[in-house]
Image (tube, rainbow, N blue to C red):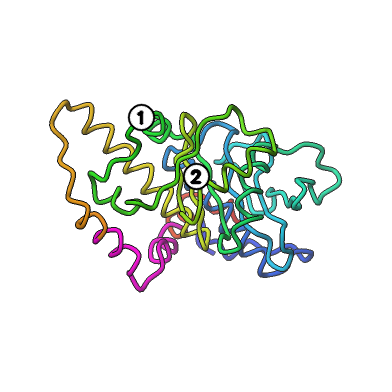
Amino acid sequence: MRPGDPTRFERPAHISESEWAVRVDLAAAYRLIARHGMSDLVQTHISARVPGRPGNFLINRFGMLFSEITASSLLEIDSEGRPVDPEVKRINYAGFVIHGAIHETRPDVFCVMHAHTEAGIAVSALEEGLLPMSQWAMLFYNRLGYHGYEGVALELGERERIVADMGAHWAMLMCNHGLLTAGRSIAHAFYLMYYLDRACRVQLKAQASGGRIVIPDPDTCEKAARQFEDDPVPMGEREWPALLRELDLIDPSYRT
């Protein structure tokens, strides 16, 4: 086999094919977030539903860097925030509060991503929020929630407000905190996170230039947003196989 050939990694016998496929894609998402400079040491989290077990989702072990996450290292927790593995004594509770809120109330959501990127935090702290000043930002035009800062998300009472502020959107700025995206698939959620962060980065660069920012008219912004939505290929599905090929060439150990 070629070096980096992902086919050499075998699925553990006690995990179904469908769950293992989710675990591999979720581990890849962690590695990609790290590779693109969107991780925060051992903080933040990405989750995905467990096939066949409604209410349960997979998430990272608290204390692992995103760059070392593997398919087998992911934890399964139930709708009450309890690890399915009795040997696991502690989870990142903020991860349960944030992700559990979305998974419980949005059956259309398969994957939730939360990130503390520099650009995302900066734009989330601006009164004007994300401006429709770039094609990347048009993806989120009138399609972005805003959730006010309440401290570290450790209180279950905040879940109702997270859900209300997210609404039917697929992305949200958590003010003074960071970014959150949700997707019908892991690929969808990653696609949104990647471009939300890039939209924030380019906005900050434009604002720092001191020049006058040109904002297209509302009809044009809405047209662009709908063009993204009307693409016959679901968001992220075109890019995801290429991203996995890149990871497999660099370090396919996420598949273990």
**Quarter containing the N terminus:** bottom right
Residue 22 visible (yes or no): yes
The image shows residue 108 at horizontal and vertical percentages of: 56, 64
Kind of residue indicated by mark 1 = Leu
Is 228 one of the magenta-colored residues?
A: yes
Say which quarter of the image contains residue 161: top right
In this rendering, the answer to whether 41 lies above or below 139 is above
- State the CA–CA distance, disc 2 to disc 1: 16 Å
| Residue 253, position as x, y percentages in the image | 58, 51
Q: Which stretch did the figure color magenta?
A: 223-243
> What amino acid does circle 2 point to?
Leu
Question: Callout 1: 10 Å neighbours few (<14), some, many (20+)?
Answer: few
Locate the C terminus and report the quarter of the image it occupies: bottom right
In the picture of the structure, the residue carrying the numbered disc 1 is: 126
Q: Which badge, 2 or 1, comes first in the chain's sequence?
A: 1
In front of the other: 255 or 51: 51
Q: Which residue is mark 2?
A: 180
Looking at this view, is 105 or 90 the one in front? Answer: 105
Residue 110 part of the magenta-drawn span = no
Residue at 41% in and 33% down? 124
Residue 8: which quarter of the image?
bottom right
The single residue placed furthest to the right in the displayed view is 86
